Image (spheres, rainbow, N blue to C red):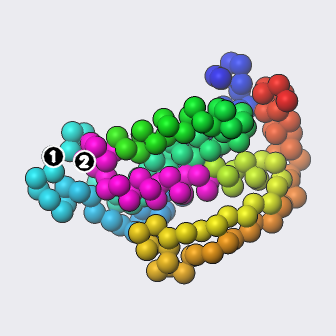
Amino acid sequence: LGPVTHPWTMGFLAAVHELTVRVTIRVKAIHDMTRPLDFAPEVVPVIQTPAHSAFPSGHATESHALAETLGALYGPRTGALIDPIAERIALNRVVAGVHFPVDGEAGRALGRLLGRIAVARLNGEALSVQLTPVAGSCRAAGAEGTVTLPAAPRPAVLEWIAGRIAEELGA
């Protein structure tokens, strides 16, 4: 998988990544959660601590969005190979001392959701999602239950891109 052999797939993954970054930045701004170092000066992060909100973990969100997307495009066997890498990325941020575990959990949930939305929109499919609270934050916002995104008419350009990706994947 690379830009020479799979340019449309890589372009779609880049678009999913950009979507994920933009959404994550907005969610971080809404929650504005402090980092472990701010609670306990004994915590000495092994990497530079970002200045923005800890919740959700951007690395966890990005890695899980891309893992979800790749799993949807390539199938469950590929997802099973990539998912542990996404989990490790989220865990490494906790071990490094720059995130709490809940930051990674929220990143996983948000990333998986964004990956599913991106693939559903690429394919013009409906998507039903069960929202559950992460550390009570969703419950407080009233965002709990099943949400269904209806199938949307797929623009011709998206249909064309989906066709190019299918060709690259040998479908």
Residue 130 - label: none
From what the image shows, is residue 166 above or below residue 158?
above
Is label 2 in a helix, a strand or a loop? loop
Q: Answer yes or no: is residue 142 visible.
A: yes
Residue receiving disc 2: 97
User: Does the CB distance between marks 1 and 2 fall below 8 Å?
Assistant: yes
Q: Residues within 10 Å of mark 1 (few under 14, many from 20)?
A: some
Left or right of 114? Residue 30 is left
Amino acid, disc 1: Val
Amino acid, disc 2: Gly
Can you give x and y, in whole percent of width and height, for residue 60 in the image? 45, 47
Residue receiving disc 1: 44
The one nearer the camera, 157 or 68, is 68
Q: Main secondary structure of the magenta part?
A: helix
Can you give x and y, in whole percent of width and height, for residue 138 in the image? 50, 73
- Start and end of the magenta stretch? 93-114
Name the residue at 55% across, 52% down.
111
Can you give x and y, in whole percent of width and height, for residue 97 in the image? 25, 47
Name the residue at 60% across, 36% down.
80
Name the residue at 75% across, 60% down.
127
Left or right of 3? Residue 148 is right
Q: Quadrant of the N terminus?
A: top right
Count of all numbered marks drawn on residues in the image: 2
From what the image shows, is residue 66 above or below residue 152?
above
Q: Quadrant of residue 132?
A: bottom right
Which residue of the protein is positioned furthest toward the left in this rendering? 42
